[in-house]
Image (cartoon, rainbow, N blue to C red):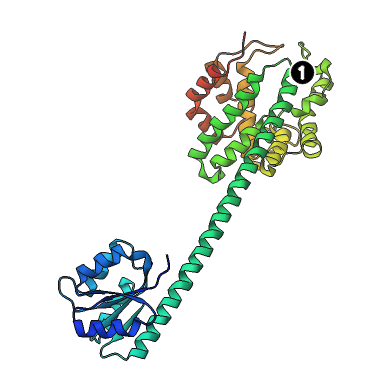
Amino acid sequence: MKRDTVLIFEDNSIEREMLAEIFRPEYKVLEAANGKEGIELLDSHFSSIAVVLLDYLMPVMDGFQVLDSLRKKKVLNKIPFIMVTGQDSSEFERQGYEYGIVSYIKKPYQPEVIKQVVSNAVGWFQYKMQLELVVKKQNDNIKQQNEVLRQQARKLGQLNEILIDSLSNIVEFRNLETKQHIKRIREFSLCLGKSVMKLYPEYELTQEKLMQIGWASSLHDIGKIAIPDSIILKSSKLTPDEFEYIKSHTTKGAEIISQAIQLNDKAVHDYACDIARHHHEKYDGNGYPDGLKGDEISIAAQIVSLVDVYDALTSRRVYKAAYEPDKAYQMIINGNSGTFSPKLLKAFAEAKAEFENLLVMYRDED
């Protein structure tokens, strides 16, 4: 509906008629003799009102009382309000502008001045409303575009997860291990990562980073596809040469991920390369392949290193029986399976019960 009406709040009938005569050639005019009557007219004709002329001194409700009532209804930013008054103080003007009026007209007034003030206010408000519509439309378009991007990201993420699952399952199938191993490594990594995040904010872990580390951990042994079956499946003790060869799955894994696996999430890709290469490094520098020491080893690789040892200890393999969870826990805490960071061990201790729950939840089938 077109806004083609002027609403006049004015208790003096002569002044009200003078104002009405000024605007009748261009607008429809509604007249109110007091604040309460004016608010009722505003409510019933809101969509057609282009501007409101509001007298300050009125019976029933004065101008500021009217503004206070309309501010609560959130009306003042939708129609321009101009106050007509004989008051002349800066404090009075400040109060009106705080309510949201766009201008003052001082009594006695000149018709041409009033017409120009109203014309400016209406024109400015029309431009403001059009601009708000343009901004809203642009925001709606941006929201739609962002939703499309989010959907595409979700689809790419799902493809990422399918690819990672498929690759890691190939490795475990070849190792004669179960798919549950992959799930356990992922869930253990998330569990330990949450404990580290809670205890040690200096590592700057976030929920998003933990999810990325969890998916990347699934590829920690991808390099084993380059190791011969005669070594991977050997049930007896490995020779020194065989052990050196199997250690190369770390560097081969990092090479495979960086050169042959296209992951659309760069963070997951970077974590996967790092974890594949460094998940056998030890905190005291006695790991491989690079002999990293302390926090030269990323927190992601440290996390996966510990959970990989825990899973190996608590799982049955061709060369060993499974240890009970308490025994495996003590072996790790006591350093029987390599040295880990004191911080990591504290985080592991905090998450002990949850690890045991996950072990039951994702246990291997007999």
> Residue at horizontal 34%, vertical 82%?
23
Instruction: Indicate left or right for 249 with 307 as reference.
Output: right
Instruction: Indicate left or right for 115 with 41 as reference.
Output: right
Q: Which residue is mark 1?
A: 174
Instruction: Identify the image quadrant of residue 186.
Output: top right
Q: Nearer the viewer, residue 143 or 331?
A: 143
Q: Residue furthest front?
A: 25
Tally of numbered discs? 1
> Residue at horizontal 59%, vertical 36%?
211
- In the displayed structure, would residue 311 be above or below residue 60? above
* Res 336 seen here: no
Estimate the x, y position of residue 94 in percent, counting from the top left: 30, 78
Quarter of the rendering occupied by the N terminus:
bottom left
Instruction: Identify the image quadrant of residue 291.
Output: top right
> Residue at horizontal 74%, vertical 32%?
288
Q: Residue furthest left?
A: 60
Q: Nearer the viewer, residue 340 or 325?
A: 325
Quarter of the rendering occupied by the C terminus:
top right
* Res 113 seen here: yes
Q: Circle 1 — which element? A: helix
Estimate the x, y position of residue 285 in percent, counting from the top left: 69, 35
Instruction: Indicate left or right for 24 with 340 as reference.
Output: left
Instruction: Identify the image quadrant of residue 91.
Output: bottom left
Estimate the x, y position of residue 338 in percent, counting from the top left: 64, 26
Estimate the x, y position of residue 363 in percent, counting from the top left: 58, 15
Q: Which amino acid type is marked by label 1?
A: Arg
Instruction: Sort mark 1 into few (<14), some (14-19) or many (20+) by Cα contacts within 10 Å.
Output: some
